Image (tube, rainbow, N blue to C red):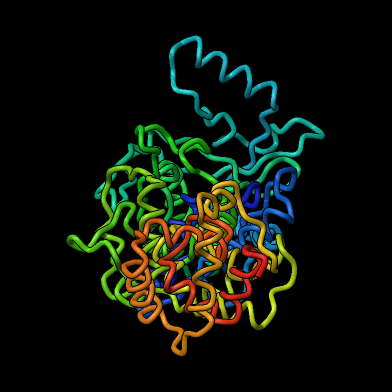
Amino acid sequence: MTVVTRFAPSPTGFLHIGGARTALFNWLYAKHTGGKYLLRIEDTDRARSTQPAIDAIIDGLTWMGLQWDGDVVFQFARADRHRAAVEKLLASGNAYRCYASPEELTAMREEQKAKGLSIRYDGRWRDRDPSEAPAGVKPAIRLRAPTEGETVINDLVQGTVTVANAQLDDMVLLRGDGTPTYMLSVVVDDIDMNVTHVIRGDDHLNNAFRQLQLIRALGAPEPTYAHVPLIHGQDGAKLSKRHGALGVEAYRDMGFLPEAMRNYLLRLGWGHGDEEIIPDAKAVEWFDIKDVGRAPSRFDMDKLSHLNAYYLKETDDRALVDKIVPDLESKAGPVSDAARLRLTRGMHGLKQRAKTLKDLAEGAAFYVAARPLTLDDKAKAAPGDGGKENLAKILPHLESATVWSAEHLENWAKAHAETHGLKLGKLLPPIRAAVCGTLTSPAIFEVLEALGKDESLARIRDVTGA
């Protein structure tokens, strides 16, 4: 049997962090088993489904690196197929026409509520002769659900879960206007897409019992279910925007890397011993949906940032330059080839200090800045107290340097400071201020090497007026 999983978001909003983890688990399990991972957009709610949300979901999955197999399936376009399935159920006696009016159903619910009963359809049209149907009323079509026994789901995450059939009523499959319900559409689509494993949030567990009854009524193969606990905030409450429940695109815009997001979301509810850093190849090798825990996970932005910092350090320097140049250009204009080269040479030192691409771009701005640099307030003060004169004095020594490397420049600075009775703490800040425009930067000798001799000296001359 070929394993087939599916991610089936509703395009009523962006791809949020919980949905991204569900997609990841479906993707990983399909890869782990050598199966297929499909994408279905459940756009039957026409009032709330929007094209921007569809675009955001597809863009988010693409950015996450969770590429699906085959074409995207759009649920609304399959409405005729959903209605055809209902005709089959009517023919087999597994569905029936219900002529109860909205007013009748409202009165039924009010009576049940007054008596303290569960609110459920009472089956009033289940066995009535259609000849009793009121004139001019378009019926809804309901599933003739079993009324005795139990429906049992052997869930790969939740374990064996059972519900008495007497607690489940005859759900609507087609509304009076002929439109399919969500419950019908999901089941028919899963059957037609040959989905073998339904992996989704545990907020869908109650739906699974009714859907399984419908699958059986249609005589289709039963899928294996895996209902994953939801993600909570650090305080244990349901995840919300204040906890970090943002769209995936927000994390991209904040400067997180997709590989860090995959690694972090993987560890929310699943683990492999004490492993924290799990690259994709290992994730595919180790992941099994049955190993997902039953307890809700807690989203921690600090842990995500820490993990992202690790992946930044592991990313190729040129690749990081490509990622941050658009941000730099949006603020300071085109980045020249010479500036890009300086940035590439300085990237190793820059990425040791950053947690996100935004941090990286902010720290890297001085490498691509046009001369003369604009010094921040602290950098403007650094040449004070003789700093500017010291810069002027060391300029000839730097100009005469025949080797321009971090090691040689550091050795020269130490020797110069000792010869002239200076402390490095007095010598270096004015240099840093002149070449960086700020007193916050990677190691200054690495910066000088990355900038190159000509650019470094030109920036110092801008400050000294030499």
In-front residue for pair 355/273: 355
Task: Tell me the residue at 38%/33% (across/down).
Answer: 166
Q: Where is residue 290 in the image (x, y as percent from the top left)?
A: 26, 60
Quadrant of image for the N terminus: bottom left
Q: Position of residue 208 (x, y in %)?
A: 42, 48
Of all residues, the one furthest to the top in this rendering is: 114
Q: Quadrant of residue 131?
A: top right
Report if residue 38 is visible in the image. yes
In-front residue for pair 159/48: 48
Of all residues, the one furthest to the front in this rendering is: 420
Task: Tell me the residue at 58%/75% (across/down).
Answer: 457
Left or right of residue 270: residue 196 = right
In-front residue for pair 310/284: 310
387 over 148 or under it: above or below: below
In-front residue for pair 236/26: 236
Report if residue 7 is visible in the image. no
Task: Tell me the residue at 74%/72% (across/down).
Answer: 334
Q: In which quarter of the image is residue 335?
A: bottom right
Task: Tell me the residue at 18%/60% (across/down).
Answer: 274
Of all residues, the one furthest to the bottom in this rendering is: 402
Q: Where is residue 40 in the image (x, y as percent from the top left)?
A: 58, 63
